[in-house]
């Protein structure tokens, strides 16, 4: 006998009593039938059944004439919804109800909700288990994280490349989620694995994809396309809005934040924090013997790296007009004033910005965040030497950047000409002119001597005494020419304004 479904009049607890008395206690069927008030055939059927099935709930097919009447129209609208929706402007059950009513169907909102539930159930994707041969595929993504950078809580971006066969991970903390950092992280990842995968899967992040065209082909950013061509791997892209297409890296990124980034990782530089994080991840990986064996298979399947290292920097050619500074990605950088009016090459790397004019003439700045500024006042010596008002505004920052003995010179000039700080700036300007011509080191030595002798003007700008050999005509010997003094000019201007 097979599984037996008990009739409704015999409760399951009574079936248990029948089977226990007959099978366990050995009570005869006739006695059990007489004791429980059941027929002998009923007792025999339950006692000899090999299994007892639970009660089955059988739903009768319900008649739904209204739903059946609108089903065809509702299914047609649902299948055609892509033609009149876009992005997050999706077709809801409530809106579908209104559209059906506009077409003459009097269906309730509850009926349409049930129809929509059936339609969505029919479109539900089925997860298919995949097999990834060694060296075939990796998945990549960015994740927002927080770190303690030099004691300051700072937002960063974690680049994660996950090899699907061996489940080995590479991470790199990036200051920006842009193409330059994205490419630099790829270079570091391939160097870490000492090889290149056959294909890498991405979502449609802006660091790689400039535009998703109709039919979902991708227009790649030129520098990302250059990276793909350099390493000769296949760039695969997920469907827009379908994060589960690369669910392995998505889940792993969330796990890494919980397993290795609590409490917040701390360090003096982002590179140091990133290196410490990668060490922790590698140590945890080596404790999984099965994954280590898989990594040995994958390592042998990776393609070797090219001898030429890919440069992730963005290169631009710009022309300076009349400003000795340049705005790049929301940050300001100074360049030598003598470069104004000419062309120069700009290389924007992950951590530095390099300005070059010719092969041997270049300037390097640390890459600044949006709204930041990096000014080297050695680039502005000549314009500041002829603009005392501008020099006055930046003098404190300038002398602090130049270092000793410039702060002492500025303090001495301010003390001597107090409270007229503009006059102190005028006296500082000749020193900048000399530094531009002679170099900072030689000018610093002369400033130290000037401070010791309290001669705070450069020799080239000090008032010259008449030469003893100079012959003055008799008609001019009664005249005395005073030495020019800009402070007196300012005083005369003040008197004129009062008058």
Image (cartoon, rainbow, N blue to C red):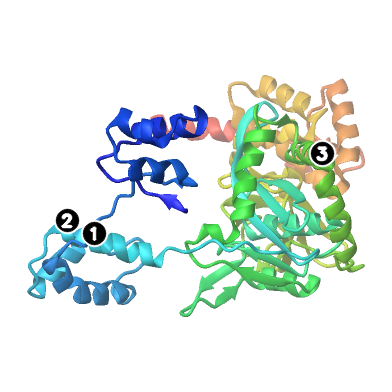
Q: Is residue 134 above or below residue 33?
A: below
Which residue is pictured at 74% across the width and 42% down the height? 476
Mark nearer the viewer, 3 or 1: 1
Residue 31 in the image, given as x and y percentages of width and height: 37, 30
Tell me the quarter of the image containing the C terminus.
top left
Which residue is pictured at 32% across the width and 28% down the height? 35
* Disc nearer the start of the sequence (3/2): 2
Nearest the camera: 404 or 367? 367
Q: Name the residue under label 3.
A: 279
Q: Is residue 27 above or below residue 229?
A: above
* Disc nearer the start of the sequence (3/1): 1
Which residue is pictured at 21% across the width and 62% down the height? 61
Tell me whether circle 2 and circle 1 mark residues in contact (CB < 8 Å).
Answer: yes
Q: What secondary structure is found at the residue carrying circle 1?
A: helix
Nearest the camera: 207 or 455? 207
Nearest the camera: 308 or 345? 308
Residue 488 in the image, given as x and y percentages of width and height: 59, 31
Horizontal placement of 7 versus 170: left or right? left
Q: Indicate the quadrant where residue 33 lies.
A: top left
Q: Indicate the quadrant where residue 17 lies.
A: top left
Q: What secondary structure is found at the residue carrying circle 3?
A: helix
Q: Which mark is residue 276?
A: none
Q: Mark 1 points at which residue?
A: 114
Q: Name the residue under label 2.
A: 110
Mark nearer the viewer, 3 or 2: 2
Question: From where the camera sits, is residue 93 visible?
Answer: no
């Amino acid at each position: 006998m097979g599984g037996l479904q008990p009739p409704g009049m015999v409760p399951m607890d009574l079936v248990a009593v029948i089977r226990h008395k007959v099978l366990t206690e050995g009570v005869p069927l006739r006695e059990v039938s007489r004791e429980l008030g059941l027929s002998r055939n009923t007792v025999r059927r339950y006692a000899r059944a090999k299994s007892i099935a639970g009660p089955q709930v059988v739903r009768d097919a319900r008649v739904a004439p209204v739903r059946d009447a609108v089903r065809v129209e509702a299914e047609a609208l649902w299948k055609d919804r892509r033609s009149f929706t876009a992005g997050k402007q999706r077709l809801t059950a409530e809106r579908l109800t209104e559209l059906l009513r506009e077409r003459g169907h009097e269906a309730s909102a509850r009926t349409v909700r049930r129809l929509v539930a059936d339609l969505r159930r029919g479109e539900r994707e089925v997860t298919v288990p995949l097999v990834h041969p060694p060296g075939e595929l990796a998945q990549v993504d960015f994740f927002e994280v927080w770190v303690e950078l030099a004691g300051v809580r700072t937002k960063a971006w974690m680049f994660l490349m996950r090899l699907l066969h061996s489940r080995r991970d590479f991470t790199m903390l990036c200051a920006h989620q842009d193409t330059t950092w994205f490419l630099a992280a790829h270079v570091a990842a391939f160097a870490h694995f000492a090889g290149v995968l056959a294909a890498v899967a991405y979502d449609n992040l802006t660091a790689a994809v400039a535009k998703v065209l109709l039919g979902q082909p991708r227009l790649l950013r030129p520098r990302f396309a250059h990276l793909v061509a350099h390493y000769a791997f296949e760039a695969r892209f997920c469907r827009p809005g379908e994060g589960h297409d690369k669910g392995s890296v998505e889940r792993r990124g969330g796990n890494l934040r919980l397993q290795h980034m609590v409490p917040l990782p701390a360090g003096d530089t982002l590179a140091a924090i990133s290196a410490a994080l990668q060490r922790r991840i590698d140590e945890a990986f080596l404790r999984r013997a099965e994954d280590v064996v898989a990594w040995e298979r994958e390592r042998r399947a990776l393609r070797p790296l090219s001898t030429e290292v890919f440069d992730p920097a963005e290169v631009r050619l710009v022309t300076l007009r009349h400003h000795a500074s340049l705005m790049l990605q929301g940050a300001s950088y100074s360049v030598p004033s003598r470069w104004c009016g000419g062309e120069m090459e700009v290389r924007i790397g992950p951590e530095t910005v390099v300005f070059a004019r010719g092969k041997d003439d270049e300037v390097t700045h640390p890459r600044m965040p949006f709204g930041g500024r990096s000014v080297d006042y050695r680039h502005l010596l000549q314009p500041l030497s002829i603009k005392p008002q501008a020099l006055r505004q930046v003098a404190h920052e300038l002398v602090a950047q130049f270092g000793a003995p410039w702060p002492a010179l500025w303090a001495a000039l301010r003390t001597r000409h107090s409270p007229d700080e503009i006059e102190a700036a005028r006296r500082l300007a000749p020193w900048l002119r000399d530094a531009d011509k002679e170099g900072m080191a030689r000018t610093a030595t002369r400033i130290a001597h000037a401070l010791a002798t309290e001669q705070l003007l450069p020799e080239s700008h000090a008032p010259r005494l008449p030469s003893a050999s100079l012959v003055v005509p008799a008609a001019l010997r009664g005249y005395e020419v005073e030495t020019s003094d800009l402070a007196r000019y300012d005083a005369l201007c003040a008197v004129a304004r009062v008058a």
